[in-house]
Image (spheres, helix red, strand yellow):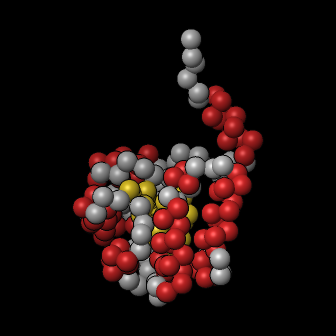
């Protein structure tokens, strides 16, 4: 969601109505926002809190690139931090990126948040992130973007057989 969408009057009420109309389980809905969308608090942060009250989960996208990342963890009702690709690109060895990725997984573990590494493009990056403690990652190493039909095909092909 964009900062503008979060500031729209009645945003949380619209989400509540959509959930009611569709019967969709709010606990399966994750709303992604960037740090900058909720940087100044106010209406946007209130909207997120209203969504959490509905049972919706919140993910902070591109985490680590904003101005107040750590302070935001105290005020934003996030369940998940999506660690920005810029901290994954040079993750091998004793790089600054590895130090930052290690600190972020320690922070998320300490705060009982889920961490997702973004922009994983190689097996080496995936292995390094796993060794650091990341259990969720996304990027071209796993799959290129897929259409809805391709997702269905992929899931069908990997669905366990039942007897």
User: 71 above or below 101?
Assistant: below
Judge whether residue 89 can be spotted in this image. no
The image quadrant where one finds the C terminus is: top right
Question: Which residue is situated farthest in the top direction here?
Answer: 163
User: 74 above or below 41?
Assistant: above
User: Which residue is depicted at the point 54% across and 75% down?
Assistant: 47
Judge whether residue 153 can be spotted in this image. yes
User: 10 above or below 15?
Assistant: below
User: Which residue is depicted at the point 59% across and 46% down?
Assistant: 143
Q: Quadrant of residue 91?
A: bottom left
Foreground of the two, 127 or 92: 127
Relative to 92, 159 lies left or right: right
Q: Position of residue 53 (x, y in %)?
A: 48, 65
Total numbered labels: 0
Relative to 98, 126 lies left or right: right
Q: Position of residue 114 (x, y in %)?
A: 38, 56
The image quadrant where one finds the N terminus is: bottom right
Q: Position of residue 44 (x, y in %)?
A: 54, 80
User: Which residue is depicted at the point 65% across and 81% down?
Assistant: 8
User: Which residue is depicted at the point 64% across and 70% down?
Assistant: 13
Relative to 69, 4 lies left or right: right
Q: Position of residue 56 (x, y in %)?
A: 52, 60
């Amino acid at each position: 969601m964009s900062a503008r969408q979060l500031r729209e009057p009645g945003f949380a009420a619209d989400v509540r109505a959509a959930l009611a109309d569709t019967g969709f389980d709010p606990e399966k809905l994750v709303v992604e926002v960037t740090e900058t969308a909720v940087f100044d608090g106010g209406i946007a942060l209130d909207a997120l809190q209203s969504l959490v009250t509905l049972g919706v989960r919140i993910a902070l996208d591109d985490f680590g690139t904003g101005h107040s990342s750590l302070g935001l963890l105290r005020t934003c009702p996030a369940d998940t931090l999506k660690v920005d690709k810029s901290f994954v690109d040079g993750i091998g060895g004793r790089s600054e990126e590895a130090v930052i990725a290690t600190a972020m997984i320690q922070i998320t573990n300490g705060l009982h948040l889920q961490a997702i590494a973004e922009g994983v493009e190689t097996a080496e990056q995936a292995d390094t992130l796993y060794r650091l403690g990341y259990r969720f990652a996304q990027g071209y190493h796993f799959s290129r973007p897929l259409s809805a039909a391709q997702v269905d095909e992929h899931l069908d092909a990997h669905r366990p057989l039942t007897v």
